[in-house]
Amino acid sequence: MFEIQNTAMIVVLTISQWTARKLDKKATQDVQQANNAASDTGRYNKYLIASDALKEINRNATTARTYHYERTLPWSKAGGAIIPSAGYLEYCDAMRGFRDEQERLVSAFMSNYESYIYQSQQRLGAMFNRDDYPTAYKIESKFSFAVETSPVPTAGDFRVQLNGDCVDSIRQEIETRTESLTSKAMGELWQRLHTAITHIADKLGGIRENGKPDIFKNSLIQNAMDLCALLPKLNLTGDANLEAMRIEVENRLLGHSCKTLREDTETRKNVAQDAAAIAAAMKGYF
């Protein structure tokens, strides 16, 4: 009997950042009065620090979140995601790299914190207020990067001194919920593949108003290739149908270069038709 507790873990990624934004009540009132507007028409939020100062920190966080979402599957409403053990070590190595990079970037930002405040005094003019800027210690504490890992809960983990029937009921509830979450996670995986293949079918089969084929970027095919390479590591239940579909996608849709798909009308047409047929066949799996 398949037990997901033996093949996967729950991971929670938490990244916090300083937004460097603050409501300016006076500026808000000035704008409202200048336009004879009501008090509930809007609010003026000022950027305390030039956006370029935090650009690299924000970019690293976005890249980390994207990586996390691509290599895990949704699990709980509390923010937990599930990851098969096959991809866990690679995931941890990548997250460690993102965390180290954030620490480096934050350290560099804090080294220049006072100079950023000085620059903002020139940039904000009359809107500048030194009291808007917390101490360096408080600002640094607003940045964090953490990954928490925990096992998938099992009914056997529940041990409380309660009436036997009550305990059995709770254990059954845990088992049912785990089965439901596993099913939804696998449905998400099928949906990702279906979305990528549908996009290929639409783009390669699409015709513009001038009668010429739709323009497509190289990423159309590359994204599908990356997903197919990742699927075996995300296949929680070892779904043989999903693996067979992945192989079919690689063999029928991803064997041609983007140059060929742009220049060879017949090949493009055949791949578009194959993609549409595969996408239609997938619908019964999610």
Image (cartoon, grey):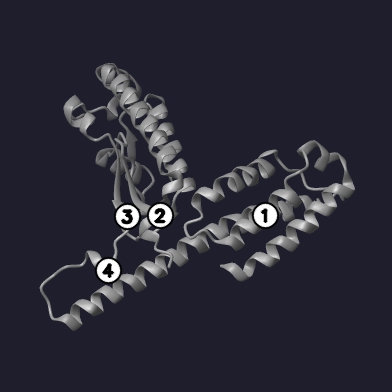
Disc number at residue 98? none
Q: Earlier in the sequence, mark 3 or mark 2?
A: 2
Among the 4 quarters of the image, the one containing residue 152: bottom left
- Asked whether the beta carbons under mark 1 and mark 4 sit within 8 Å of each other, the answer is no
The answer to which of 197 and 157 lies nearer the viewer is 157
Dividing the picture into quadrants, the one containing residue 162 is bottom left
C-alpha distance separating marks 1 and 3: 46 Å
In this rendering, would 36 be left or right of 136? Answer: right
State the image quarter where residue 195 is shown: bottom right
Q: Residues within 10 Å of mark 4 (few under 14, many from 20)?
A: some
Q: What whole-number distance in Å separates the C-alpha atoms at marks 1 and 4?
A: 38 Å
Q: Is residue 51 visible?
A: no
**Residue 104 visible within the image:** yes
Q: Quadrant of the C terminus?
A: bottom right
Residue tagged by mark 3? 40
Please name which of the two marks, 4 or 3, marks the residue nearer to the observer: 4
Question: Of helix, strand and loop, which one carries label 4?
Answer: helix
Q: Position of residue 63 (x, y in %)?
A: 45, 36
Q: Earlier in the sequence, mark 1 or mark 3?
A: 3
Q: Which mark is residue 197?
A: 1
